[in-house]
Amino acid sequence: MRVIRNLESLKKSLGKSRISRDKIKDKVARIISGVRDAGDNSLIEYTKKFDKVKINPRELRISESEVSAAFNELDSSLISAFKVAIDNVTRFYKRQVPKTTRVKSDNGKVLLNRYVPLERVGVYVPAGTAPLVSSVYMTIVPALVAGVKEIVLVSPPGKDKNMNPFILAIASLLKIKEIYRVGGAQAIAALAYGTKTIKKVDKIIGPGNEFVTEAKRQVFGVVDIDMLAGPSEVVIIASGTSNIEYIIVDLEAQVEHHNGLGIVITNSRKVIRELRKRKVSGYALRVRNLDKIAEAVNMIAPEHLEILTKKPHTVLKKIRNVGAIFLGEYTPVALGDYTAGPSHVLPTGGSSRFFSCLSVKDFLKEVHVISYTRKALQEEAATLEKIARLEGMDKHIESVKKRLM
């Protein structure tokens, strides 16, 4: 455990720990260009180069028989576990669906906002040394609740050419039919630009390594993305009364993620002493009061925040920048990763200052509907004319006057 003496030192340490994109952005740009120009042929080439798997264009898409076989091999207890998790996530997001707002004036002016689902969404699911099977339902369920009709799943194949069977089985439970065995930056490029086999999407969601993240950054604007996710991180707020065993095991759980980062913020010398004695990985920052704790958390803007104090709600009021908050000793981050309900797709690397956690709204477009009667137009014409004239928009003014002649 590295003890940090003040907030400025913590800022510097965190800055050094974040991966620079300079080393990979040119590589990713070449991959994207290759897929944009050569389509399926590039996907085949890059799959052979990076995944060490040889496939042909017909094998890009996973067949229904492969999906069925994967599902049929599942243990019944595991199916039950997946169903419980999916049900929890579904129940949470069904309460998130926004309602149409309607404003009506006596003169006949009507204003509406409508929510329209995206037509086609691409979901990326990592499948390296530890395939993120939970990411399947954590990303797809909010899209389904929003009403997205076409959901495409992409994930890299294993050395045996097959996709992870648990990923396929959950996709089967969610009735996802369009699945492709392709990963990395090349999969992001295919979703963004389309190939002969893979039709382009409107939005790409899901976590991935630094190459996937950089690819999402580069295709943003051609398609929408959820966020630019980096290594997972947790901040734990602890006091002298917090259970040290819970702190340690939660820090150790964080390190299970690739490049996972754990930070403890505490007002207790005893907590820091114990963490150093136990040789736990991560950072520890000692602060004197509640305001300093909140300042530190808001500066870090972490993905996960655990508040393991006696009165967690007192601290909660001052926290602004965070992806997800876990209150109390019996609420470890693991619950958010797997079963609680809210998606584990959260902003990382300080981006919770401006990014939000994944929600139903990520899959909806808000459309404004404006309707005026002649009377309503007449009442607003003079106001409009004054403002439009300042901008030199004479034809805008004429478009209103013509209707009132």
Image (cartoon, helix red, strand yellow):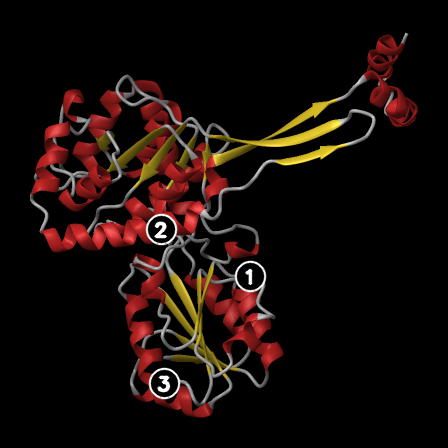
Where does the image place residue 232, in percent across and percent down from the top left? Answer: 37, 59
Crowdedness of circle 2 by 10 Å Cα count: few (<14), some, many (20+)? Answer: many
Q: Residue at x 42, y 33 (%)?
A: 147
Question: Alpha-carbon neighbours of circle 1 within 10 Å: few (<14), some, or many (≥20)?
Answer: many
Q: Secondary structure at mark 2?
A: helix
> Of the numbered discs in the image, which one, if any, rests on residue 361?
none
Q: Quadrant of the N terminus?
A: bottom left
Instruction: Tell me the distance, in whole angstroms, between the alpha carbons under discs 1 and 3.
Output: 25 Å
81 horizontally vs 71: left or right = right
Residue in the image at 7% along x and 44% along y:
73
| Residue 99 drawn above or below residue 394 | below
Residue sticking out furthest to the front: 106
- The answer to whether residue 204 is left or right of residue 321 is left
Using the rendered view, name the quadrant where residue 17 is placed.
Answer: bottom left
The amino acid at mark 3 is Asn
Q: Residue type at mark 2? A: Val
Q: Which mark is residue 321?
A: 1
N-terminal of the pair, mark 3 or mark 2, is 2
Residue 243's disc number? 3
Residue 7 visible: no
Residue, x 72% and y 34% (percent of image)? Answer: 103
Please identify, in this view, whether the residue under mark 2 or under mark 1 is nearer the observer. Answer: 2
Q: Which residue is mark 2?
A: 89
The earlier-in-sequence mark between 2 and 1 is 2
Q: Is residue 127 above or below residue 313?
A: above
Decide if residue 326 is in sight here.
yes
Q: Amino acid at mark 1?
A: Asn
